[in-house]
Amino acid sequence: MFIDALKTIWFDSGFAALSWQHLVMIVIACVLIYLAIVKKFEPLLLLTIAFGVLLANLPLSGLMKEEVGSEAGGLLYYLYLGVKKGIYPSLIFLGVGAMTDFGPLISRPSSLFLGAAAQFGIFIAFIIAGLFGFSPQEASSIGIIGGADGPTAIYTTARLAPHLLSAIAIAAYSYMALIPIIQPPIMRLLTTEKERKVKMEQMREVSKLEKICFPIVVTIFCVLLLPSVAPLIGMLMLGNLFRESGVVERLSDTAQNALMNIVTIFLGITVGATANAENFLKLETLAIIALGLVAFMFSTVGGLLLGKLMYKLSGGKINPLIGSAGVSAVPMAARVSQVEGQKANPSNFLLMHAMGPNVAGVIGSAVAAGILMALFG
Amino acid sequence: MSFFDSLVVSIFCIALVFFVLISLFALIALFSKVLAAAAAKPGKTSVQVAQTAMQPEAVPQNMEGPDLSTGKLKLKGVDEKTAAMIMAIVSHESSIPLSELRFKSIRAIEEK
């Protein structure tokens, strides 16, 4: 009787249901947790994503179980609705807008060209993914990794190819964390010592009125032109208006801190929880990770090449290193431009100049995502 | 989707991204000029503040994101590196992020 009870407990437990695939996923989750804690790879999201992966691969936990009739679903199933319906990425954009100073972009609007050129990798990856046999929806979701914008990648993938969500989210955030490793060799390869040494002129002062008008003008124009980007651009610009108007400090504070943190937890854990063994342990996951890297590298190349063109056209006044900041990983990509510029010329301060293309990249990747969703959604 | 189709879609998409952002460029340039013209009314005198001016605003303590500011800074007898150091020190000592500080000029004071 006692043995039978033990047997029942054992067979009802998750241990009995563990397969080798679950074990592999648990190891992957632990590696990601290690990278987040020890190596500090985008820890805010990677840690929660990794823990979501862990939870989803503990058999019989039922955290992602769908609601069937009167039977309630799992906790993460309900939280995942925020990803599925595109709510969390839009709310993250609200916080990003509240944290972002668009002053450098308004001061030098030509930064927008660099923000556009740095979306080049999205479409290179899109073409290659098509050759690998991915559908246009899947190829668009994979390509958007090259935009270097986590919320945009998640938003697009949740709309176009939700079955790839975990692989794409993990690839996007991992590569964003690896920007200081991925970008510098490409930057040094594509620019000359002379170009990297260029000191840029100080930017003009941007008035408060300009900063207040900016989010309103961008919202009206972008949303009228591409209605599919309304959730992302609309929230980004609302957050920025909170910041710049100066009359809603409490809302700005909430968007930047409390709301952002809460949504980050929900987004991370539910995206991670989609990485169950059946979905994740496939050859296509490796292909996605490789294509994501290609997208990132070509986006950097696109920004740098246009930066070089602007260097020529401006008579050597623009340092092409700021082009690589057109990928929208804010402010990491701008910091990389600053570091590389200072290596070539210790008196060089490129950070402010690189912030223009950097925030332009946020708009650029949202626009690219909107176009892909309009075409394939 | 064939390679050719993918290529055509990609060219169309990147062209559209450029079109949108170039249009934004034109819009920003336009509204900046309009606002600058509106601000430069005749008879209005600009006041030059010789000393370093700080304009702190209430900000959350744990705000993340780019710690930056924009604007033109006049340096008198101070090189850029020293100016950057001074701004960083002021920001640190006052516990106000650089993005919330506005420096109009930094001038070296000669000892008599």
Image: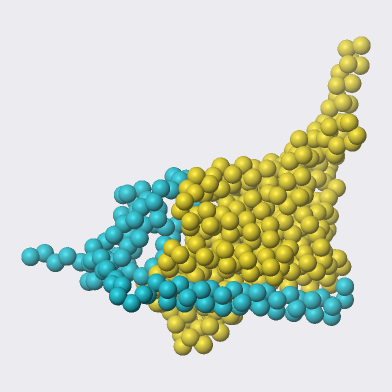
Chain A drawing hue: yellow
Q: Quadrant of residue A288?
A: bottom right
Most foreground residue, A11 or A205: A205
Would residue B53 appear left or right of A336 to someone viewing this image? left
Residue A369 screen position, x and y as percent = 71, 65
Residue A346 in sight here = no
Screen quadrant of the C terminus of chain A: bottom right
Residue B49 in sight here = yes
Q: Is residue A182 above or below residue A93?
A: below
Q: Residue at x 50, y 83 (%)?
A: A311
Screen quadrant of the N terminus of chain A: top right
Q: Which chain is cyan?
A: B
Q: Residue at x 56, y 42 (%)?
A: A258
Q: Is residue A84 above or below residue A294?
A: above
Residue A329 screen position, x and y as percent = 59, 61
Residue A47 screen position, x and y as percent = 63, 45
Q: Quadrant of residue B72?
A: bottom left
Q: How many marks?
A: 0
Residue A235 screen position, x and y as percent = 62, 56
Would residue B98 appear left or right of B46 to someone viewing this image? right
Q: Is residue A156 above or below residue A70?
A: below
Q: Residue at x 86, y 37 (%)?
A: A67
Residue positioned most to the left: B112
Q: Residue at x 58, y 67 (%)?
A: A217
Most foreground residue, A344 or B33: B33
